Amino acid sequence: MKPEQILEVPARVLTQAQREHYFEHGFVGVPGLLPAEILEELQSTTGDFVNQSRAVTESDQCFDIGPGHTADHPVLRRLKSPDEQSEVYWRFATGLMADVAADLVGPNVVFHHSKLNFKWFDASDTVKWHQDIQFFPHTNYNVLTIGCYLSDTSMENGPLAALRGSHNERLYNQYDADGNWTGMLSEEDAATVDTDRVEYITGKAGTITIHNARTLHYSPASKSPVPRPLLLNCYTSADAKPYTPHPLPTSNTYKVVRGQAVSWAEHDPRPCQIPPDWSAGYSSIYATQSGEDKNDTAMM
C-alpha cells in the first residue's frame, strides 16, 4: 500500500498528525503511549533477564554480552529474540504495538523480529549510522521498527537519533572496501550526514519511537551509569516479502499479527543492497559494527 492509501484507513492508536509525520520524515516519537501496568510488567521482566545474564560468561543464543561483563557488573548489550524468551514480550508485540504498526504499514501486518538493546556507561555502546533494510531486504519498503523506552531517555543516556527525510533518499553501502559486512556507513559516508536534519528522540519511560527501515539512524553512547533498555519490534506489511534468509528467525517470525495473509507481493522499483547469507545465524549490530564477527560476514 502507498502512504496515501494507508492514511485513508482509520487509525487504531496514532493520531493522523503522527502518521503524517512518519511518512514525511521517516520516523516519529510518541510519548506516554504505554499504560502503566504494561510498562511495569516489561520493566520487571527485563530486570529478571539482566539478573539471569550474570551467570553467562560469553554471548549465546539468548544474551549478547559486552567486554567486561561479570556477575557483579553485567554488561548485557542485547537480549536476543525477546518474543521467544518470555510471553510478556510476545504479548506486547502482538498487542498495542501491532496496532501501532497497522496504522503505518496498513491493516495486514506481519511480525519480523524483536530485540532488547541496552545502553551502558561505555563508549563502545554507540550504535553507528546505518539503515535497517540492508540487513533484511524486502520487495517493498513498508518495513518499520517500533522501539519502546523502558526507562527515561534523555541526551545523557543515548537516545535514538534519525535523519529527517532520509527514508526517501539513497541507500548506503554497508560493506567495507574489502567486501566485509559492517552493518554501518563508512567513515567517509558518515561524515556527509547533514547534522542540521538530525533529530534526537527523547522521552519518559513508555515513549515509543518508530522508524522506517530506510531511515538513516544511530544512537550515541550513554553518559549515565544506569543502563537504558530499548525494546524493539519490527513489522512489515503482508505484501512485503523477504528476498533473503532471516538473520535470526524464531517460532514467531512471519506470523500475521493483524489482518490476514495476502497472495500478492508488492514491488518497489528502488533497489536494495543484499546482505551476507544469514543462514548460519547472526550475532548483533554491536558485534558487527565493532568487528567482533568480521570473519563471518564477508560478502558471498
Image (cartoon, helix red, strand yellow):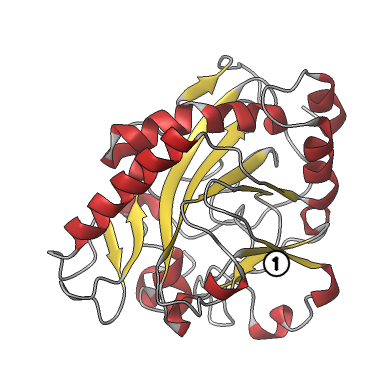
Residue 215 in percent (x, y) is at 71, 56
Q: Is residue 148 left or right of residue 83?
A: right
Q: Nearer the viewer, residue 87 or 189?
A: 87
Residue 25 in percent (x, y) is at 82, 52
SS class of the residue under badge 1?
loop
Residue 42 sits above or below residue 170 on the image: above
Q: Which residue is mark 1?
A: 172
Q: Nearer the viewer, residue 56 or 40?
A: 40
Residue depicted at 70% across the width and 28% down the height: 103
Q: Is residue 78 left or right of residue 189?
A: left
Residue 37 in percent (x, y) is at 42, 34
Residue 157 sits above or below residue 41 on the image: below
Residue depicted at 66% across the width and 20% down the height: 107
Question: Is there any visible trace of residue 241 in the rendered image?
Answer: no
Q: Residues within 10 Å of mark 1 (few under 14, many from 20)?
A: some
Quadrant of residue 110 within the rendered picture? top right
Quadrant of residue 122 within the rendered picture? bottom left
Q: Amino acid at mark 1?
A: Tyr
In the picture as drawn, the residue positioned furthest to the left comes out as: 55
Quadrant of residue 277 within the rendered picture? bottom left
Q: Nearer the viewer, residue 297 or 238?
A: 238
Q: Is residue 211 left or right of residue 2?
A: left
Residue 164 in percent (x, y) is at 81, 59
Image quadrant holding the N terminus, namely top right
Question: Is there any visible trace of residue 89 in the rendered image?
Answer: yes
